[in-house]
Amino acid sequence: MPKHFDPGSIEDKWYSFWEDNGFFHSEPDDRESYTVVIPPPNVTGVLHMGHMLNNTIQDVLVRRARMQGKNACWVPGTDHASIATEAKVVQKLRKEGITKADLTREEFLEHAWDWTDEHGGIILQQLRKLGASCDWERTRFTLEDDLYEAVVDCFIELYERGYIYRGKRMINWDPEAQTALSDEEVIHREETSKLYHVRYKIKDSDEWVTIATTRPETILADTAVCVHPDDERYQDLIGKTAIIPVVQREVPIIADEYVDMEYGTGCLKITPAHDENDYEIGQKHDLEIIDMLNPDGTLSDAAEHYVGKDRFVARELIIKDLEKSDQLVEIEEMQNKVGYSERTDAIIEPRLSLQWFCKMDKLAKPAHKNVMDDNIEFHPSKFKNSYNHWMENIRDWCISRQLWWGQRIPAWYYGDGKDDYVVAKTEEKAVEKARKKSGNNDLTADQIHQDEDVLDTWFSSWLWPITVFDPEYIRTGEANEELEYYYPTQDLVTAPEIMFFWVARMIMSGYEFMDEKPFSNVYYTGIVRDSQRRKMSKSLGNSPDPIKLMEEYGTDGVRVGMLFSSPAGNDLLFEEQLCEQGRNFANKIWNAFRFLSMNRTEEMELKDSLEIDEDNLVDRWMLSRLHETIDAINKDMENFRINEALHKIYSLIWDDFCDWYIELIKADEPGASIPEDRLSRGFNFFEQLMKLLHPFMPFITEEIWQLIRDRDTEEAMIVASWPEFDKASVSTNDRALFESIQKMISSIRNIRAEFKLSPNDEIDLLIKAKDEKTANALSNNEWIFRKLQSIHTFKVAADLDKPETSASAVIEGTELFVPLEGLINLDKERERIQKEIDRLEGFLKSIEGKLNNDGFVNNAPKDVVQKERDKKEDTETNLEKLREILEELDS
């Protein structure tokens, strides 16, 4: 058996063993189902730290459920990611000298599928390296034929139910991807922007009015100037005409209560085509709409000036022209929120556009109610607040995207009228419907054309918990065996940033189509950040390569490192030392197993079950600690306190089993082997510990599990039974007594350290128990003290006197005495300690001098001052300890 644990030599072996033997696969049966659907990563994505955290947590939940005897089904898959994938394909083609405009839709999609075939699925292979026990036979992709068809069926069904409509509305426009975005796909960032104050001429007068804008280029599309009807400054201007700078367009000055008299100059420019609020005012006052932007963010012919220039180039040019015409009054800096595309990071433009929308008010009601009523529970529950706010202010969902990669909208146009369209699944059906709607029975297929746009990616993934089991259900309304068995799923693990993109919408579709929640619990992970609290990202270069981390520290070590500091909903401050701690834990476990194995003979047979020596306090204590931990871990897992559960099993293994239990089952004579009965109990305890640890560290636990005994395939750790909690095995009295002994032994070790006594130096130990009951209990367990300490004389009584010149400690009312006479040179020790006291007193005086100096305290950096305060506190603590030791020597 190797001295050091080598994860690289076992990970592929056991993963293949699990997969080859079908342990990940699930089929409906008579067991309780436990179902998790993976948040599908982008098909061309690669594993990052957020994926690592999210999927490790899912695997912990799934592995534990499997051990509990549930029929665990973890469905993996990938998302086609319309915007992100199309952008990558366009970028690849550009390098080859090809533009999207050069290709037909079919030709472009061939390139997109080639890209997907080449890069898709990489992340699923990487999840295997992580140990993810997904049912790979069930792997789905949102653009598979049957899932594609289900999304089209969903569109048609919701259209027929009156939820989907087509309309011209102000939407968020991504000029880089050249597509509409939903409100949730816009990231608003607080930035320092420039506020430009510009003078507008009042027609037929010497008057001017000043407006303030952060987007001066949109002046070219202004069609009104607006003031508040109660603003005394502008009462005489209402009804007059203003002249727009540069374009010299004459526009009305109108009044509307929307205007904030305190913001800027209290006078607004109205640009209905490029601001949502302006559009509402424009509709109300019947204003002209001028769209001055092309889809790529350059200025259109309607702008009349700077045509073809990028919007930000045009901004600089118009500022120069306004300066020349003496119409730029001033430029001031201000804080405001700027919207960025969640996918391309381009600054979005509000744009009036004809798009497809999904009405959300009715769909949202059951999804809102069932979360607020905890029928679906959020972990942590604090996320209900933001969910509630979003649901109460929900807006219709813009579901069309001006892309080719995705599910094409099943709408067919047969004329130029606003309503000259039908919604149908096939061209044949569309012709039939178009003939009926138009009254033209001679209409043919070549006279209709399908909508060029595709559906928002989230419009497919909101059906994920349904369609991965039964894609035809949306069309038929009749659930197959799998959907009936696996739906609703149990737990969803995801990031809070997609709460509205995905979680809320899955809940909506679940109640709309299944009349049932899609899952019972939502566990929100935090964001993985670096030590400077920055979100880890490739662009910042602060994110390690997860694969390299696993190669260096072992997958189990990295999983432990990730989970150690990731409480639900709180961000994880990741440092590689966490993975090193995980690797050290694996080595600690391995060394404990090696020690037990080295004491085992080939002929020795282990007992089938754990049977303790009832007369042995250590056995009773270890059994009690085991069952206390089983109970605590069960409660933690039920409440999604996964990192707390890991900390508990970590402490049970490292502190209790390795540092205490193994030491106390060693042979009584130096060099002898552990007696077989003790060794068997040690292995039996170890098996239970490995079971508890398996969901967190699957590879090392399976390796050790298989090495402890010869096992059949069906007895593998992955399907071993989860340890059952036995309340009768928990003894608070045994635990209290043993913990008191632990504290006493730790105090003895401290005394040895203080007086520089070797562990091999025999000492006399006298214990003055707080009462006779304690005295008897300690006396009965004298062997524990002798096992862990070199003791010459051991005496326990309730009426002992303190020996002269002795070190002492008090533990829960019981006093320990270690006579020092003959162990150390008392005079030299007093002299050494006094010198150290003198040195520290001088050091303390210099620190106090600094801290009593107001100039230093008020002017030095806060962290420098705090360091001095910390030094003072540490020095005072050390002085107090040394004076106590000196007092012991003088007593």
Image: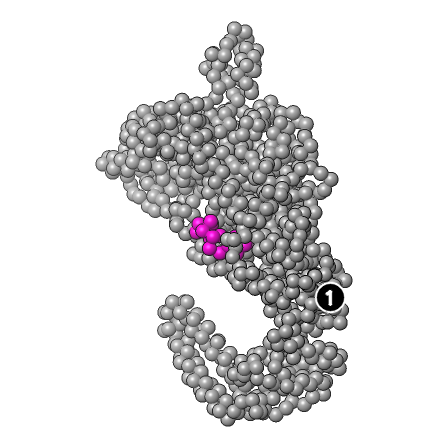
Quadrant in which residue 613 is drawn: bottom right
Q: Amino acid at mark 1?
A: Ile
Left or right: 454 in relation to 736 = left
Choose between 95 and 567: the one closer to the eye. Answer: 95
Give the magenta part as a residue range. Answer: 544-558
Dot 1, crowdedness within 10 Å: few (<14), some or many (≥20)?
many
Q: Is residue 680 above or below residue 748?
A: above
Read off the residue under disc 1: 612
Give how far across and how far down residue 595 sits, in percent: 59, 66
Residue 143 appears in the rendering: yes
Quarter of the image with the C terminus in it: bottom right
Q: Residue at x 51, y 57 (%)?
A: 6
Give how far across and how far down residue 885 sits, in percent: 54, 85
Q: Residue at x 63, y 31 (%)?
A: 470
Quadrant in which residue 193 is drawn: top left
Outermost residue to the left: 324
Give how far across and how far down residue 666 sits, in percent: 64, 72
